Amino acid sequence: MPLELARLISEQVSIQLIDVREHYEHKGFNIGGSLIPLGELTQNIDRIEKEIPVILYCQKGVRSQIAIQRLEDKYPFENLFNLIGGVDEWRKQVTY
């Protein structure tokens, strides 16, 4: 999935990237997504797009999957996707 996401970004496809890691993790390295830590998602629900694909990511893909489950359980989202492998896999597969 990291290579597919890199392609979408390079082609400037309309998507939203959300980093659900903590502030210090995002500051250390990120792929351009908006930071909304996992624990702050429900307070920031209005920042999450509903009409375009939203890709959530974290370090390994676990927290972002939890984020998706929580959001889909509480809200009518059908446009959420997990960056499988997270930032770790991005670093292995994507080079700029």
Image: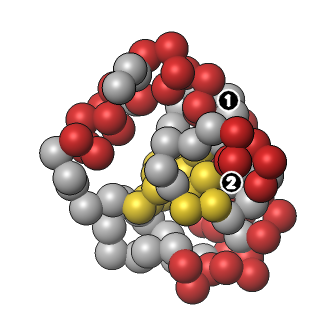
**Which element carries disc 2, helix, strand or loop?**
loop
Q: Which residue is mark 1?
A: 60
Does 71 sit left or right of 4 as displayed?
A: right
Q: Which residue appears at 33% of the width and 59% of the height? A: 15
Q: From the viewer's side, name the closer residue of 38 and 33.
A: 33
Q: Which residue appears at 38% of the width and 20% of the height? A: 95
Q: Is residue 69 visible?
A: no
Q: Earlier in the sequence, mark 1 or mark 2?
A: 2
Q: Which residue is mark 2?
A: 20
Which kind of residue does numbered mark 1 sit on?
A: Lys
Which kind of residue does numbered mark 2 sit on?
A: Val
**Which element carries disc 1, helix, strand or loop?**
loop
Does 79 sit left or right of 9 as displayed?
A: right
Residue 19 rendering spot, x and y as whole percentages: 61, 52
Q: Which residue appears at 50% of the width and 26% of the height? A: 90
Residue 92 rendering spot, x and y as whole percentages: 51, 14
Identify the residue at the far bottom of this view: 46
